[in-house]
Amino acid sequence: MSEFSMKDLGLVNFFLGISISACKGGYFLNQSKYIHDLLNRTGLFSSKPINTLLSSKSLIASDTSPPFYDPSLYHSLIGGLQYLTFTRPDIAFSVSQVAQFMHSPLDIHFTAVKRILCYMCGSINHGLFILDGSIGSLTC
């Protein structure tokens, strides 16, 4: 404060799309508003939630699947999902799988992206709980 003028704005509540809630013993970080906006943009907000992500097997590029009609939409959704991995490590593997096909996405790859989004629809309030310097995945 001796070098620059500063003002105490209190506890942080929302920063760079991440909601921060003070809970007993730590802080809970989630991106439910960002997920909500992403699901609304894709028209999947009212879709049926699913409990599982992609299988652990890698998506294999298939010559039988046609190219996805809107690669820029695919790129945008992958970017949004990658941003969500900051507070949602549970989707990191699946997002990295679909991100491998950014150069030429096929319909099968977009179907996998929609599956991730349907999973997010059912787990919109999940996030990270930071407790005494350790991180765990919980809800608050």
Image (cartoon, rainbow, N blue to C red):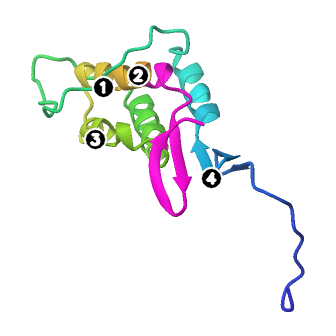
Q: Amino acid at mark 4?
A: Gly
Say whether marks 1 and 2 touch (CB < 8 Å). yes
Q: Amino acid at mark 2?
A: Tyr
**Gap between marks 1 and 4 measured at Cα:** 30 Å
Question: Counting residues from the N terminus, which is met first, the one under dot 2 or under dot 3?
Answer: 3
2 vs 4, front mark: 4
Say whether marks 1 and 4 touch (CB < 8 Å). no
Secondary structure category for the residue under label 3:
helix
**Gap between marks 2 and 4 measured at Cα:** 29 Å
**Gap between marks 3 and 1 measured at Cα:** 9 Å
Say if residue 103 shows up in the picture.
yes
Q: Is residue 48 left or right of residue 40?
A: left
Q: Amino acid at mark 3?
A: Phe
| Residue tagged 1 | 53
Name the one closer to the observer, 41 or 85: 85
Looking at the image, which residue is at 11% across and 30% down?
A: 60
Q: Residue 139 colored magenta?
A: yes
x then y, percent, for residue 78: 40, 37
Residue furthest front in the image? 24
x then y, percent, for residue 136: 45, 48
Q: Is residue 11 above or below residue 104?
A: below
Q: Is residue 22 left or right of residue 11?
A: left
| Residue tagged 2 | 119
* Quadrant location, the C terminus: top right
Looking at the image, which residue is at 30% across and 18% down?
A: 111
